[in-house]
Amino acid sequence: MPSDGTLDQEQYLIARMNSKYIGDDAAVVGDTLYSMDAFFEDIHFRREWMTMSQIGRKAMLVNLSDAIAMNGAPKFALVTVSLPQTLTHDEIDALMESMEETAKEYGCEIIGGDTIGGDKLHLSITIISKSDFPLLRTGLVEGDLLAYTGVLGESKKDLDALYRGETIAKNARFYEPLLRAEFIERSRHVLTAGMDISDGLYCDTNKLLEINHYGFEILENINDEIGLSGEEYEMLVSFNPKNLKEVQQIAKETNTPLTVFAKVAKNKSRFMCKSHHF
């Protein structure tokens, strides 16, 4: 949501859709989760910044993130690719092999999709997952703690460096998001709500609060470099304070940095944030 409180185009479009399944990182239908994300050239990446293998891997990771965020086990993927005529067979091989290998790491198989010709390299991926205990965005309770995983801000720093024409490390967060599958699976029984951080901590915290009709009290000040860094794909989670030690222990055992930054409160407090879309 823009800082003036109005809906941007993306949120407006979503608000116009009428379905009980809309509102989470994936649509939950029975024990099956359905999610889809686009990864478009000159919107999410530039080809001069990344190898074809890096493009394929990140495209798959950001899609798998939705399933992981909801405590889902990815099973199948459908991939649509817009292919510029300038791509060589070797480049197409590198793209597809990286997507297939990345999906396989998470127990997922590419089972179909579509290809079209286009001026730019665009990918759209649908992930079909299974979960007996999905983690939803709804479920916040007054007094819950809000926490995020990982070290936020690295993705924006990487992106800024690329815009300046600099090179970044091969394992930089912009190239290689970390998905917290083990942490979410092991802590799910004490988490009340959660979502992945794709639009920045400020904006995504606002989304979580808005859907639950709560506000927050800040416990640890967050600077804009952390709060406005988008495409992190770390986790934003909530839990009862009585479970803090257990969550912290699971985080330690899974090598997951965890920062508690706010408490859910009965107010209308929101972070000032900028839309990362359009």
Image (cartoon, rainbow, N blue to C red):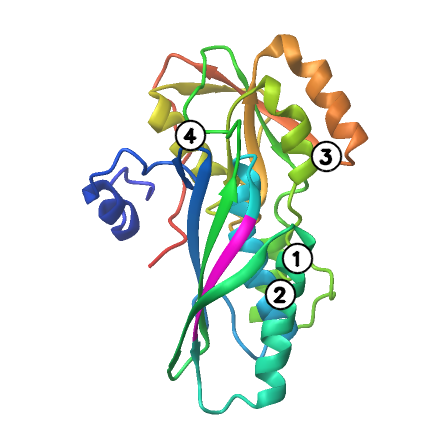
Q: Establish if 212 lies above or below 34.
A: above
Q: Nearer the viewer, mark 3 or mark 1?
A: 1
Say whether disc 3 or disc 2 marks the residue closer to the N-terminus.
2
Look at label 3 and name its amino acid: Pro
In the image, the segment drawn in magenta is 75-81
The answer to whether residue 103 is left or right of residue 268 is: right
Residue 76 is covered by the magenta coloring:
yes
Say whether disc 2 or disc 4 marks the residue closer to the N-terminus.
2
Q: Which residue is mark 1?
A: 104
Q: Quadrant of residue 52?
A: bottom right
Q: Which residue is mark 2?
A: 100
State the SS at label 2. Answer: helix
Q: Which residue is mark 3?
A: 257
Q: Nearer the viewer, mark 2 or mark 4?
A: 2
Q: Residue at x 70, y 67 (%)?
A: 168
Q: Main secondary structure of the magenta part?
A: strand
Cβ–Cβ below 8 Å for labels 3 and 1?
Answer: no
